[in-house]
Image (cartoon, helix red, strand yellow):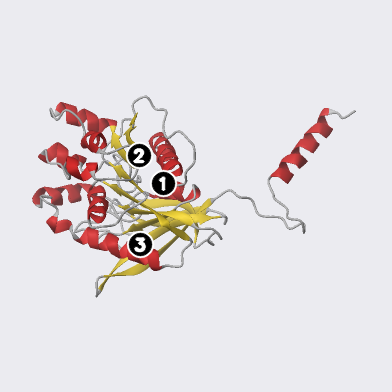
Amino acid sequence: MLNNLSLNILLLISLSLLAYNKDENGIVDPPSELRAGYKFVKIPNNVQDSIMVAIWYPTLDEENDYNYNTAATGLTLKGAVSYNGSEMNENYPAVIFSHGFSGGGIGSVEICEALARAGYYVFVPDHSDAVMSVRIQGQSNGTLDEALDYLNDNPFGNGENFGYRVSELQSLIQFVNASSFKVDKSRIILGGHSMGGWSVMKVKEAGFNPTAMFFFSMGELNWLYSQNRYFEASTFQSIDFPTAYFYGGAEYGQAIAADLGNVYAAYCFTHSPSPSYGLLVNQGNHFTYNSQAIAPGSFGNNKQITAMNARLINFLNRHVKGQNIVVTNEPEDVTK
């Protein structure tokens, strides 16, 4: 009769065997837990220009602590990745993400790393904004506060002065489609934060049809301080793919206090066809999606980032990978 020690040993052996797969020749496959790889490249934009692009992707290589770059705050932006790790022998969906004005391609590493570990490629360019709080490479030239001052002196208007962002994203899409990265080019997702949401929507209006789109507080500052909407109802009504609109609880409070009735995300959700999601970041503000080094006074804490990543990945897994899962059970969220 087996004693407790023997049972424990057998259990450990069984679990170890389950962690590996053997083919008929006895060859053992490596563990299947995905990790985040990271690299960056310079790609051409227009005839003479170029832009830097940060790339996160799935890998089985070991992650290590990694210092991305130093932000205008003087703080180092830190993460955990396998730098230049090997790619998987499988094609994965791709996210093309546009950062908010001044944010930088590495401004939201906690989100990008999580997407890579969930089985997505993530491509994020350094847009050519006049004020950059962090860059993939090189020196930043301003803080988020200075970026807000710039926007105050140079109002968004109809976005004409920010059309370079659309061109840069179109160049990135061309690069991804022509690249040898292990990307499923039939499943490309667009995402954006703040003005980045406007940028990817303009790419859609220019003719690119993504598999899905997600937005982090798109146009909320423009709505709060100027009472202007980036896009009207007809733009959202023409969408024929799944959408997810994240917004912060603090932003909602600001909108109510300003007698605006609701956040801009609610307008976007209301006019978007099903399936669509309005997702609250509890106590979140406009910069909750950024890393601490970018926004020391308003960055997303671990609880907020974890909750946001879980629902974002659920959304993508359901509507891009076709998994039969529930996107959210949070009582404040709305779905249709």
Residue assigned mark 2? 300
Which quarter shows the N terminus? top right
- Mark 1 or mark 2: which comes first in sequence? 1
Residue assigned mark 3? 53
Q: Are marks 3 and 1 in contact (CB under 8 Å)?
A: no
Disc 2 element: loop
* Above or below 24: residue 298: above
Q: CA distance from mark 1 to mark 2?
A: 9 Å
- Mark 3 or mark 2: which comes first in sequence? 3
Q: CA distance from mark 3 to mark 2?
A: 23 Å
Q: Which one is nearer the viewer's eye here, 174 or 226?
A: 174
Residue assigned mark 1? 110
Q: CA distance from mark 3 to mark 1?
A: 17 Å
Is residue 290 toward the left or the right of residue 321 in the image? left
Q: In percent of the image, x 85 and y 28: which residue is there? A: 3
Number of numbered discs overlaid on the protein picture: 3
Which quarter shows the C terminus? top left
